[in-house]
Amino acid sequence: MKYSSISILCAALTASASAFVSPFSVAKRTVAVAPIAHENGFRPTTTAAAANQQCRSNYSFLKAAQEDSLDVVIHDLLKISDFVYSFANVRRIVKENDGKQRSTSRWFGKKYTVAFDTPALIRTQDGAQEQSKDKLLKYVITPDAIKEFMELNRKWYKEPVDEDGNAGDWEFDKTVTEKNESFLLEAAVEEAAKDNMKIVDYDDEFCKGKGGLVYGVVVNLTRKWITVAFRGTIGSTDLMADRDFRLDHESLFDSEDDIFVSGGKPGTHMGFTTYLCDEKKGDQDGRKCLDRILSCVNEEFKSNPDVVGKDFDLYVTGHSLGGGLANLFAFKAAQLKANNDESVKYLPEKITALTYAAPCVGNDDYNKEFQYLEKKGNLRHIRIANEGDVVPTNNIIPPASLAIKGNSKLYTQNGVNLHLHADKEVEVDYRATKSCWSQTSLSSLDNHLVTEYYKRVELLANKKVYQQTVEELYNAAGDFTN
């Protein structure tokens, strides 16, 4: 997990993705809920922010009053962003080993044939039902199904755990050792079951150990959310996308209707944009990955009986590369919504991205387009970044800059930034793009890991900020034009 997006600096410091911890450790973490006595440091609502409210003609403030506080959203979406890493590994191990002959050791071990028990519990694309052209999965995956699968198949898995109790990347256990203790993942999905969550799609079909586009679409019936979650960087394939900072001026802006602010030339990160806008392998209609995901989500809002008419929200999330993809996906969905495009007819008026360690994904003119949609009320982005994490920065420094294509100086951040510290309360500001040099230290790699995001997100000093909604944070952040 976790070399990440822009951080080619990470690649310069280590040559192997296996050097990164892949922590799915939510089972042993609890969210602090005690009140905080001192004031937080974000700005109060300003006159400019009040003026901006007039621009949000498409957004209902009665709806805003009903939103979940950030305290709910920030924790749950971090867990989902983490889960997309781990679940891909669990499924990959089945795909690569089920029905294959293996040996308990390399030279003189006992040979055997791997036979997972009921793999269709987590790989529903292998079922007998008719497949939707918008999904890989043929039927939903529930937390209970994942837990049952893990209980049946513990002998085939190893879940490395460090001294702090954080889980690493899943591995195939060639020794076929029976295990009585549950994995951390099992405890985590038990918690997810309380929210009555369902994975309606999870597409990792053409991805291997070196990376590729992986995403999940999750329905939370308790919170009344649909969430699209993208996986971050895991290996060399992803790194090749991460390092491509050339500007793509066409994929998200291929007609005049796609540009709302005259006189500009919006461009997006070539590597990330290509991931989303390449043709989806195996798609019946030859669509882009982006279009297929949008079609899947639109159909959930249109036809899912658990969702229709129940005022569900749409969130998009991811860590690192996944956060960059979430930014672009949310933007495109909001852009289409602002144009009254039929492909997003049933999506809610507002799309909210909530990202962790997300890299910059576009230039200043892209940000102007982003701000237009923010002002219109179609788009929100809460961007969580750790102090000392080089991934969410621009102006990459040598030697990492020697490995990239394009010019990272042209890039800027979007949305409201929650800048997390290890030992003091969060800073809240609008955009707040930071340079690579300002965030570089000997601990830059550690500061980027999901485990460090868990620690800082759960810092008690941040509790008061989390009591606000996304809209309240936007009001506090001020004008949308800086």
Image (spheres, grey):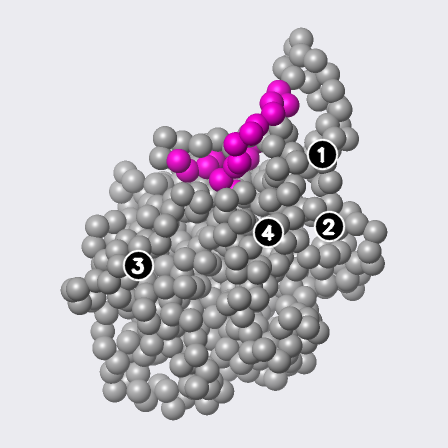
- Residue flagged by tag 1: what amino acid is it? Phe
Q: Nearer the viewer, mark 4 or mark 2?
A: 4
Image location (x, y in percent) of residue 319: 46, 53
Spatial separation of the CA atoms under disc 4 and disc 3: 25 Å
Where residue 156 sits: x, y (%)? 63, 29
| Residue 180 painted magenta | yes
Type of residue at label 2? Answer: Thr
Q: Are marks 1 and 3 in contact (CB under 8 Å)?
A: no
Residue 219 in sight: yes
User: Residue at the location (83% across, 58% down)?
Assistant: 130
Q: Secondary structure at mark 1?
A: loop
Q: Tell me which label, 4 or 3, sits earlier in the chain.
A: 3
Which residue is label 1 attached to?
A: 116
Marks 2 and 1 sit apart, C-alpha to C-alpha, by: 14 Å
Please tell me the numbered disc located at residue 33.
3
Q: Which residue, given by chain and number where applicable, does mark 4 sit on?
A: 143
Q: Secondary structure at mark 3?
A: loop
* Amino acid bearing label 4: Pro
State the residue at coordinates (43%, 86%). 62
Q: In front: 28, or 302?
A: 28
Evaluate if marks 1 and 4 touch, with contact meaning CB atoms under 8 Å apart: no
Residue 403 visible at all: no
Q: How many dots with numbers?
A: 4
Residue at image point 49% right, 40% down:
184
Q: In the rendered image of this protein, does residue 288 appear above or below residue 97?
A: below
Question: As drawn, is 108 to the left or to the right of 238?
Answer: right
- The part of the chain drawn in magenta is 165-185
Q: Earlier in the sequence, mark 1 or mark 4?
A: 1
Viewer-closest of 186 and 127: 186
Mark 1 and mark 4: span between their CA atoms? Answer: 18 Å
Q: CA distance from mark 4 to mark 2?
A: 13 Å
